[in-house]
Amino acid sequence: MPDAMLELEGLEVRYGVVAAVRALDLRIERGELVGLIGPNGAGKSSTLLAIMGVVPVARGEVRLRGVSITGRAPEAIARAGISLVPEGRHIFAGLTVEENLRLGRAARRDANGVEADLRRVYGLFPAIAGSLSRQGSALSGGQQQQLAIARALLARPDVLLLDEPSLGLAPTVVESVFAALEEVRAQGVTILLVEQRAQVTVSTADRTYVLANGELRLSLTPADANDTARLAAAYLS
Amino acid sequence: MSTLQALVDAVALGSIYALVAVGIGLVFGVLRLINFAYGELITAGAYTLWVLRSLPAVVAILACFAVVVSLSLLLERVAFRPLRKATPATMLIATFAVSYLLQSIYLLVFGSLGNSVSTLAGLQQAVDLGGLRIRWITIVSLACGSLLLIGTAILLGRTSIGLHMRAAATDFQTARVLGVRANRVIAFAFLVSGVLAASVSVLFTVQNSLVTPDLGVPITIFALVGVVVGGLDRLWTATLGGFAIGFAYSLLGDKLSGEARVYLPSLVFGLVIVVLLLRPGGLFAGQPRSVERV
Amino acid sequence: MRRLEPLVQYLGPATLIVAVAVAGSLTSHAREIEFRNALVNVAIVVAIYVFVGNAGVISFGHVSFVAVGAFLSGLLTIEAQSKQFVLPGLFGFLRETTIGDLPALALAALAGGLYAFLVGLPLMRLSGLPAGIATLAVLGITYNVLRNWEKIGPGPLTLSLVPETTTIWRAAAGALAVAATALLYQRSRAGRQLRATREDAGAAQASGIDVYRQRLVAFTLSGALAGFAGALLVHLLGSITTDQVYLSLTFLTLAMLVIGGVSSLWGAVVGALLVSGANSFLVDAENTVHVGFDLTLPDGTSLVILGALMAAVLILRPSGLTGGREFSLPRGRAKAR
């Protein structure tokens, strides 16, 4: 079997004595969009933060293209090709939109193609292109989310991690964000999407896993999107 | 001395303190560390000038920059990097310890009596500008101060490392997740603050030629006071604060009678306490970063 | 076992203090002063610990209270006749009053406490860095005023002719008393409430603890103990200048506290004694000490080595040598786990 794009093996994340994630195995192939859903406190965000090196990995391993990145610093992981769109977006409110985008280039390994990437991102999010000189704080919630994704894409990542991009957004805005994600995947970026909104995630992702109490409980395919009974059972299990 | 002349001198001292304020503020921004040992960098520069007093001034000044910047980077690497995850109180006291250590080294090597630096003593001479007798050092301090501040502004505002520093100062974690290299940004902050400290060494020793092991202590404390009054989190207001302290100090020292002048430090410290009480949160408003700073 | 816990916690510090006193009484007179000095350092560091350790708020201002206690007790115990000549500028009552050294100790404590209370009234609203800077400003003001106002002290000169009444036993008794007060306080309701605010000020406030009030109580008590320790200091030295109670004492005592472990009495005592001991040893070594071989350090290196040692401990072990834990017997600790 060839190396997966991103692979978690026996991942465990602890905060003191509490295990937030336990023995998590996950394999994501190049170009896949994989969803991770589950109730609050299931360990979804912790998984992303551990992949990114923001919280320490207590046990297990994270591999990118077959190479272990466990224990590396966040900036090293970013430079290795993983970008995180953090929960709550974390736009730099005091910097301009243009500066926020420039920060996204910090993790790029080569400066070539920045112009093309910028055009692609502006095409994806026209609202961003129109407000380059505004302060990050002046954007609406939906625009900030778009900016956070745009910023992550400018690192030209192989893998894009998203932590609840729909949080606090109006339904129409959520739709546009998910549409953008499908387009990003079409451009060849591997995506791991953590979400609370089960239905839209299951129908968009190639595979969706349900995480509860730090463990994988269930694997779903787009065909299950309308099977409300299965979705509900996953959350209640 | 005319009021105008006093004003000009006050502006000159103000610009020196503004440089110190920026030096302290830059490191605070990225590390949330108040470096009490900052003054000892200035002292190191002053002693370098003294040691190389027989060489041409240009050489001595270049060496001063080299020594101070290297020391600044060395302190970052050896002392402050291992402490990034320690509590703020421990970090503060550690910078105190470093300051104490450096002072005792200066004491050991150079003695307590003080050494006179005369690298740019010629700048003490005055020039007559329409009835105002202004010393060259006043003009040079102002010019260098402004240039360095403008330079720092360009560095922060226009370059990519400057952008990274600004981002790290607001939210270090997110900056790192975006690929901003923590060690590089922090080392860079220490580098720039070292350059500023070396400049202060050169300018300050022209005005105060006697170098003692504790030369840097009052400079740090007063500049720190200025930084605090201006607001540690915002470099530009901190700069203004540093300038204001130097300005007020020089002007009040000139205008107060001899009797009252000795209590000037108390006045300044009292002012700081009042400012802190009135807007403690405003001055230090930053993101709480209790969870793993770097 | 639980009822004995306070006694056990006192046992460690008290044993160390008594051991130092006994050791000191057995050495030569010249050497004894170093032991007395170490014990007075214990009193100062524990006084600082009462506030800094329990509240979790840094203070650079405590040496102000040490200074107030030292100068007040020093001035009041000098013979009135000498004061007429040496310090003619003093306020009348300071110049003409002479009291015994024990009442002077009590008065120093009172003055330290009162000064801390007055300073704390506004300052205890601050925490974190603002608190650190504001207390540093208090230290600056105290130093500046003491150094220049000749109605309340010797100004820039040395205050001398102070009776040297801090014997080794009195230094030990003083340190024991300060440590006992610190322990009683931290185990009292007020002390436990304050320690709760240290972990999570917001949660403590929500559960009805008045953070400001508890900090003020600790600051005042801590100031009183610091004033008392200052009086011990001046009667140990026999003379004092304002520079002796300014930045370097502040730094040294805080470093002792942090090196020992800031959040326990045990840490405060251990830190004070270890750093004092290292200091004495290094100073002696400048005049040759015998440690299996003759060790002679060049003059002036003791400060450098001490500074480097302290910096190294702070960097390598930021939570202090004791890790901030109280003294416990080996078995007791095993049980508690």
Image (cartoon, coloured by chain):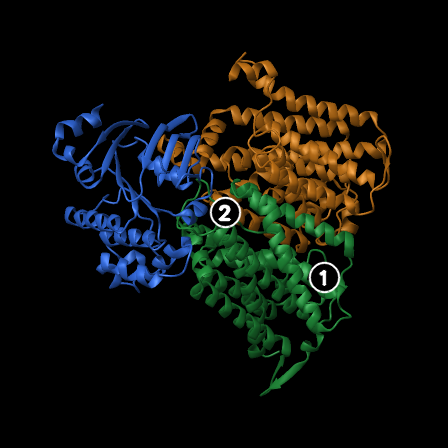
Q: Colour of chain B?
A: green
Q: Quadrant of residue C25?
A: top right
* Mark-to-mark CA distance, 2 and 1: 31 Å
Q: Tag 1, which secondary structure?
A: helix
Cβ–Cβ below 8 Å for labels 2 and 1? no
Mark whose residue sits in front, 2 or 1: 1
Where's residue C21, x and y in %?
75, 26
Above or below, A26 against C70 in this view is above
Q: Is residue C296 above or below residue B235?
A: above
| Pointer 1 chain | B
- In percent of width and height, residue C276 lies at 72, 35
* Chain of the residue under label 2: C
Q: Amino acid at mark 1?
A: Tyr
Label count reads 2
> Which structural element holds mark 2?
helix
Q: Which chain is blue?
A: A
Q: Position of residue C270 (x, y in %)?
A: 66, 29
Classify residue A66 by image quadrant.
Answer: top left
Q: Colour of chain C?
A: orange
Pointer 1 residue: B47
Disc 2 marks which amino acid?
Leu
Q: Residue at x 45, y 46 (%)?
A: A76
Q: Which residue is mark 2?
A: C129
Q: A68 and B15: which one is in front?
A: A68
Say if residue C67 shows up in the picture.
no
